[in-house]
Image (cartoon, helix red, strand yellow):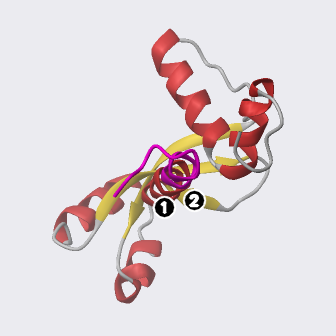
Amino acid sequence: MPAGMTALDDFTSFVAARVQWQSAIEAIANTVKHADYRDTGWEKGTAMVASFVPEPLQADKDACRDGFELFGFMHKHRNVAWWDIALRQIPSAEAEPGYIAFGDTLDEWRSILDDLGYITD
C-alpha cells in the first residue's frame, strides 16, 4: 500500500486527495459516455469552451463585444491564439484552462503510478 492508504477500499479517497481535477474529469467522462448530465463529485461544475491569447493581445480580446467579434479576432490571431476547454466550479468566477487541469492530472497520476512502482524509467 502506498503511504496514506490503509486499505484498498481507500483508493478512491486516496486518488481524490492527490489528483485535484479527478472528480471533474470523471463527471465529464461519465456525462459523455452516458449522454446524460452527471456531476457526482463535481456538483455545479461546468466545462466550457474558452479562448486563450498571449498577454499582449488580452486587452484586444477582452474588447470583443460579442461572439462574432471574438471568432474574427481568434481567426485573425490563429497563429498565437487557441481554443480550449475551461473548468469552473459554480459559483466561482475563476476558471482553470483545460490544458492546465488535464496536464496537472497527468502529472499527478504519473506520481501515483511512480509511488506504486509501475513506472520504471
Name the residue nearer the viewer: 49 or 107: 107
Q: Is residue 43 visible?
A: no
Q: Is residue 62 left or right of residue 121?
A: right
Name the residue nearer the viewer: 97 or 93: 97
Could you classify mark 2 by the number of other residues whose Cα lies within 10 Å: few (under 14), some (14-19), or many (20 or more)? some
Could you classify mark 1 by the number of other residues whose Cα lies within 10 Å: few (under 14), some (14-19), or many (20 or more)? few
Label 1 – label 2 distance at C-alpha: 7 Å
Name the residue nearer the viewer: 92 or 103: 103
Q: Is residue 108 left or right of residue 43?
A: left
Label 1's element? helix
Q: Residue at x 41, y 68 (%)?
A: 64
Residue 100 pos. (x, y %): 48, 61
The residue pinned by badge 1 equals 100
Residue 51 pos. (x, y %): 39, 60
Kindly identify the amino acid type of the residue bearing the numbered disc 2. Glu
Seen as rendered, the residue at the extreme bottom is: 56
* Quarter of the C terminus within the rendering: bottom left
Q: Residue at x 59, y 30 (%)?
A: 26
Quick check: marks 1 and 2 in contact, CB under 8 Å? yes
Label total for image: 2
**Which label belongs to residue 60?**
none
117 part of magenta stretch: yes
* Quarter of the N terminus within the rendering: top right
The residue pinned by badge 2 equals 96
Residue 112 pos. (x, y %): 58, 49
User: Against 88, is 40 above or below?
Assistant: above
The quarter of the displayed image where residue 44 is located: top right
Q: Is residue 23 left or right of residue 50?
A: right
- Specify start and end residues of the magenta stretch as a single range: 110-121
